[in-house]
Amino acid sequence: NKNIIEKAFSQIEGDYSCLLKELISLNLDFVHRKSKTLLLPIDKKERLAFHFALQIERTKEFRKVFENAYYTLTSHFSNINFPKYGKKDYKRIHNSVIMEGRMANFYANLLTDRKWIFLVNHTNTPFITSDNPCIQIYHVNEIKEPISPVSDKVTFYIPISPILAIEIYDKKIKCDDLSYFDVFKKDNIKWYNLNIKCQCTMFLFSNEKISDYLTENLL
C-alpha cells in the first residue's frame, strides 16, 4: 500500500531536511576555509548515511534488483515452474523490503564505513538531481555484468544543492575522510550530471530551465 509507505517516510523526512540544510549552510564558509577537512560528527554522518540509503532503496532503479533476480532464476532453472511475476508483484516485494528495513541498514552501514568527499562546484554549470537522487557510479570502461555495490569500482553520488554534492568512495581509495574537493572544470560537472541523467527514471531537477540546460550541457 503506497499510502503506508508515504506515511512512514513523511515522519523522517523532516530530520533529513534539517540535515541537508546544515550541509548547504556550510557553503558560506567555503571561501574562507583554511583546512580541506570537514569536521562532521559521526552521529550526523550515520544519520545522513541512513537517509541516503533510503533514497537508494525507494527508487524504481532499485526495484530492478528484484526483476533481475527473477529473470536470472527463470533463465537458469527453466525446468522449474515459477509463478508468473509482473509489475505489481515487484512493487509488492519492493515495498516489503523497504518496510522491513534490513536492506536500508545494509546500505547505511556500507555508506558510513566509506570515505566521503564533498564536491564543491565553482563553475556556472549547476549540479542537477533527479527522481533517483542517490546514484551508483561505475568507474570501469565497460560493464559486462552486474557490479556489487560493495565493489571498489563503485562510488555513490548524491547532489545536495546546485553547488554541493557528495561522492562516497571505497575505503581502499587513498584520500582523507570527509574532505573537500574543489571542482573548477565544467566538463567534470557535466560528467556527474550525465550520470544523473542516465539513471533517472522520469524527472530531472535544476535551478535553471531544464530543457535549455539539457540541450546545452548533456545532449
Image (cartoon, grey):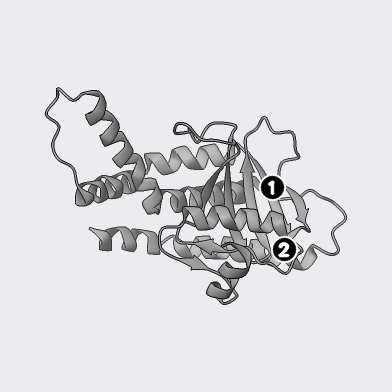
Quote the CA–CA distance across marks 2 and 1.
Answer: 14 Å
Front label number (2 vs 1): 1
Q: Which residue is mark 1?
A: 117
Seen at 76% across and 51% down, the residue is 181
Q: Is residue 205 above or below residue 165?
A: below
First reached walking from the N terminus: tag 2 or tag 1: 2
Crowding near the residue tagged with mark 2, few <14, some 14–19, many ≥20 C-alpha atoms within 10 Å: few
Front residue of this view, candidates 180 and 21: 180
Picture quadrant where residue 163 is located: bottom right
- Above or below residue 97? Residue 188 is below
**Residue plotted at (25% across, 29% down):** 75
Q: Position of residue 215 (x, y in %)?
A: 57, 69
Q: Is residue 31 left or right of residue 87?
A: right
**Tag 1: residue type?**
Ile
Task: Return the residue at label 2.
Answer: 26
In this picture, residue 181 sits left or right of residue 45 = right
